[in-house]
Amino acid sequence: EIVLTQSPGTLSLSPGERATLSCRASQTVSSKYLAWYQQRPGQAPRLLIYGASNRATGIPDRFSGSGSGTDFTLAISRLEPEDCAVYYCQYYSSSPRYAFGQGTKLEIK
Amino acid sequence: DVQLLESGGGLEQPGGSLRLSCAASGFTFSTYTMSWVRQAPGKGLEWVSVISGAGDITYYPDSVKGRFTIFRDNSKNTLYLQMNTLRADDTAVYFCTTILNGAFDYWGQGTLVTVSS
């Protein structure tokens, strides 16, 4: 069973800065099935990135995904107060199994 | 616009049952794989079940297998989750989602299930 580990647990940055969030898989996974989500306080999660690097509909280009193998990254440039949220990575395997990372909390100072 | 509206949550005693519903609109429901994902209070996300567009293929994680049943009525554009033998650790907000290429692309707002005596 694949385990996704996200780091850091909490990230505190100022508006205008760039955030880099990490997701590490316990074994090599297909980039095709790696996704990222944003969950703002009190809201449902929202798909940001699918296939490791493809932005979902309506997602601004400040959000970008990259990576392969076991290491994946979500980058958010030009941080805005509305980016304050918990971010989750997720992987799909053909069993099927859907695994989520434990989340990274992004705080905007 | 895609809309998913969950209902049916509430307070239930351990060992009891609940049925959740998800009314879908804004897309061709019968062509989409659908899923339930839950989130315990203050915790992360956990996948609970998945069903094919035709409703003939379902999968569950071990944590709910044998207790939960996902099913759908494509004539009513509605997804369901029958939850039996509820336990305290089933307490969570339950989200209905669409699935595309292994990603949960649209989410409802969720319905809260509380299991407590």
Image: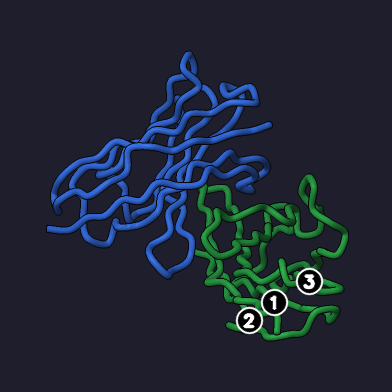
Chain colours: A green, B blue
Of the numbered discs 3 and 2, the one sitting upstream in the chain is 2
Distance from Cα at disc 3 to Cα at disc 2: 20 Å
SS of the residue at dot 3? loop
Residue on which disc 2 sits: A7
Q: Position of residue A93 (x, y in %)?
A: 58, 53
Nearer the observer, B106 or B1: B1
Asked if marks 3 and 2 touch (Cβ < 8 Å), the reply is no
Quadrant housing the C terminus of chain B? bottom left
- Which amino acid, by three-letter code, is at mark 1? Ser
Left or right: B86 with respect to B51? left
Q: Quadrant of residue B82?
A: top left
Query: Which label sits in the foreground, 3 or 2?
Result: 3
Q: Are marks 1 and 2 in contact (CB under 8 Å)?
A: yes
Where residue A105 sits in the image (x, y, percent)?
Answer: 60, 76
Q: Position of residue B111 (x, y in %)?
A: 40, 46
The residue to which callout 1 is attached is: A22
Confirm whether circles 3 and 1 share one chain: yes
Query: Camera-side residue: A38 or A50?
Result: A38
The residue identified by callout 3 is A80
Q: Amino acid at mark 3?
A: Glu
* Circles 3 and 2 on the same chain: yes
**Distance of label 3 from label 1 (alpha carbons):** 20 Å
